[in-house]
Image: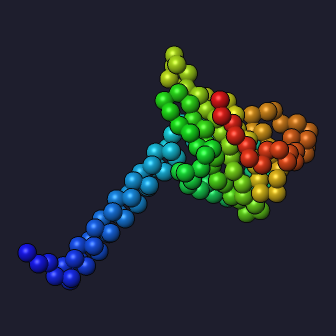
């Protein structure tokens, strides 16, 4: 049985559209799941509660971008979550590095580390109490490739 070139082209186009739509839908659903998670929500609450970090970014408005699914800083399992969340404000942008663990008894997530690293190289630890103006911000060259794995 012969199949015309026209039918093969139509099949190829259909298959490409179906595959692209499926991948796009899966990507969207994964991003939505991460953005609705407790560990993601807790980290953003901590960021928004830190006036030094918000002022450094130039927020509000704060824009939270999708995580890079293939980034080596993003690891998830039932008991822990490590993420690198891209954020921007009107002044600059950076990454919010977080590590959260789930309490085995209560099954609730707790934020154990939250560090904002802005493009200019400043790092702000969001879990330490605010110190006098400007003392919480530090420039650390060795944190360029932060890895908060446990």
Q: Is residue 59 left or right of residue 74?
A: right
Which quarter of the figure has residue 66?
A: bottom right
Where is residue 128? Give x, y as percent: 79, 33
Q: Residue drawn at (14%, 78%), measured in percent from left and top?
A: 3
Where is residue 102? Give x, y as percent: 55, 26
Quadrant of image for the C terminus: top right
Rendering colour mode? rainbow
Residue 124 visible in this rendered orientation of the protein: yes
Which quarter of the figure has residue 22?
A: bottom left
Of residue 4 and residue 35, the one placed in the foreground of this image is: 4
Q: Is residue 145 left or right of residue 68?
A: right
Q: Residue drawn at (66%, 39%), measured in percent from left and top?
A: 98
> Eyeballing the image, is 31 above or below 89?
above
Of residue 57 and residue 93, the one placed in the foreground of this image is: 93
Quadrant of image for the N terminus: bottom left
Of residue 4 and residue 131, the one placed in the foreground of this image is: 4
Q: Residue drawn at (69%, 36%), measured in percent from left and top?
A: 148
Q: Is residue 45 left or right of residue 35?
A: right
């Amino acid at each position: 049985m012969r199949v015309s070139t026209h039918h093969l082209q139509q099949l190829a186009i259909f298959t490409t559209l179906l595959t692209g739509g499926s991948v796009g839908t899966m990507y969207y659903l994964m991003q939505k799941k991460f953005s609705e998670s407790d560990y993601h929500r807790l980290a953003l609450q901590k960021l928004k509660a830190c006036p030094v970090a918000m002022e450094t970014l130039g927020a509000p408005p704060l824009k939270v971008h999708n995580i890079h699914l293939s980034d080596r800083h993003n690891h998830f399992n039932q008991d822990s979550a490590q993420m690198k969340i891209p954020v921007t404000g009107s002044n600059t942008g950076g990454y919010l590095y977080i590590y959260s663990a789930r309490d085995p008894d209560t099954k609730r997530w707790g934020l154990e580390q939250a560090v904002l690293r802005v493009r200019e190289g400043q790092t702000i630890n969001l879990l330490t109490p605010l110190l006098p103006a400007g003392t919480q911000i530090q420039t650390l060259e060795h944190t360029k490739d932060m890895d908060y794995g446990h």
